Amino acid sequence: MLMLPLLLVSMDVSVLYFAIPSISADLEPSGTQQLWIFDIYAFVLAGLLMTMGSLGDRIGHRRLLLIGAAAFGTASLVAAYADSVETLIAARAVLGIGGATLMPSTMAMLRTMFTDPAQRAKAVGAWSGVMTAGIALGSVMSGVLVEYFWWGSVFLVNLPAMALLLVLGPLLLPESRNPEPGRFDWLSVPLSMAAVLPVIYGLKELPSEGWNVRYVVSITVGLLFAALFVHRQRTASAPMISPTLFRGRGFAPSVALNLVSAFGVMGSAYFTTQYIQSVLDKSALEAALWALLPSVPIGVAAPIATQLVHKGVGRAHVVATGFGIAASGFGLLALAGTDSMVLVLVACAVLAVGCVVVMSQIMDLALSSAPVERAGTASSLMETGTEFGGALGMAVLGSIGTAIYSREVPASAPDVAHETLGGALAVADQVPGLAAAARQAFTSGMQGAAIAGAVLLAGAAVLAAVTLRRVETREPACETPDEPSELSTSGV
């Protein structure tokens, strides 16, 4: 029951990849409106994660999950039959609100449902695999549905799952909440959104348009509000994010390492999706289907990592090895040429396996470190870190790749060709040899970004080995199941 909404929420991140052309033909949005149709979901989701995680601790995670499922299902129906751009954008915003309630609620309930550490580790591993696979499945599903139905069908697939959750959720899922949550800090809500949204927006736009003043200002404003948000949490009598969370063993390192892992996943995806489609000249649906192959080994990566930890291999060693595997994936990507599909797919698979190994273990460590009554807040912080890490990965690695690409494109090419590979291919007929040169330049940019990614993840491997080893030395020799409490049994 918990994996079902998680799968749909993660799929909705990429479900419009192939539906946008049909939507554009039907609703005729402007360029700005098209961007909002695509991005509003992720922006609202990222901006409200912390609020919804804290709210779930107060009103109950099952209750918030069911409220979110109702909102998600209703918004999906409205989006499917939207007859105007404004309606579709509004529906996508509500989908983001629903998604922000569903993601932290599912992870928080793992903390309260699975009191045995070994069982919880397996459940968190499954959670990590489903979330990662959902993003890959979303684009493929949208391509298939748009091929045989109309664009609204990509939203209608959410309805049966949400209806099932609303019917069976109250019967199968236990309620959990903080028995003494304190007063809700409403001022922290706008502060958290003002901190998250400008930074996410600026980081997402930097790879495509470079260090535009507007995006630099956006990031700066977000960071200023982040400082105000942190000050509020440290001084408020009942803060949204309790500073005591970061005093728990392993929680702060988990947030940082999770951010680096998301950096690697999204930073590599920025290049590999374009490489398969534009460098190898595959259609959008072909590219999505090929991109599914690297996600196959993800399903076994997290369970194997969990078994290794359960059998006595230190978590520090497993996480460090995961980062090392991911770094080697970037290393393979740095060897790719302009006709290296197999090598790129293998590199993607290796990188994804390494990152899922890391995510599954540090998610489990973060949940174990957090008090059970603050499981929602802890979950939301981890997921907000994932959003930041993904945006930062695309911004940093994308900027490196774009700089190399722009430098290697022939100087005689039109200005648009120096900006993006897509722009170069659009005017390739005007300049002999431009298409081949642009593809080579993009591949060189990908190689440079991959080297930077490999160095970063190799450094993260060393950091994880040192930091988590210190955490392990302070842990008890063996964990025992949590004592039963009203938090984990209420409603069963």
Image (spheres, grey):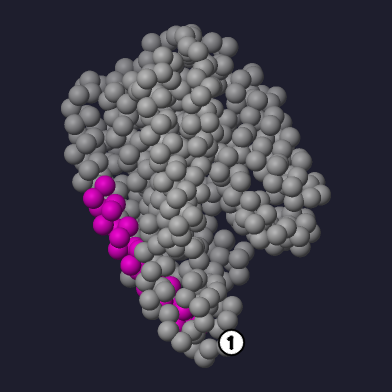
Position of residue 167 measured from the top left corner of the image (x, y, whole percent): 70, 24
Q: Is residue 297 magenta?
A: no
Residue 79, quarter of the rendered image: top right
Position of residue 35 measured from the top left corner of the image (x, y, whole percent): 62, 55
Name the residue rendered at 66%, 51% in the picture.
Answer: 37
What residue is disc 1 on? 429
Does residue 2 show up?
no
Position of residue 159 measured from the top left corner of the image (x, y, whole percent): 72, 38
Q: What's under tag 1, amino acid-wise?
A: Asp
Magenta stretch: dominant secondary structure? helix
In this view, 367 is above or below 218: above
Q: Which residues are magenta?
A: 435-460
Q: Is residue 486 left or right of residue 364?
A: right
Crowding near the residue tagged with mark 1, few <14, some 14–19, many ≥20 C-alpha atoms within 10 Å: few
In this view, 242 is above or below 353: above
Name the residue rendered at 49%, 84% in the picture.
Answer: 413
Q: Is residue 453 magenta?
A: yes
Name the residue rendered at 32%, 26% in the picture.
Answer: 246
Position of residue 270 measured from the top left corner of the image (x, y, whole percent): 46, 59
In this view, 188 is above or below 205: above
Does residue 422 show up?
yes
Name the residue rendered at 58%, 12% in the picture.
Answer: 491
Residue 368, quarter of the rendered image: top left
Q: Quadrant of the N terminus?
A: top right
Closer to the camera, 120 or 429?
Answer: 429
View extreme (bottom): residue: 432
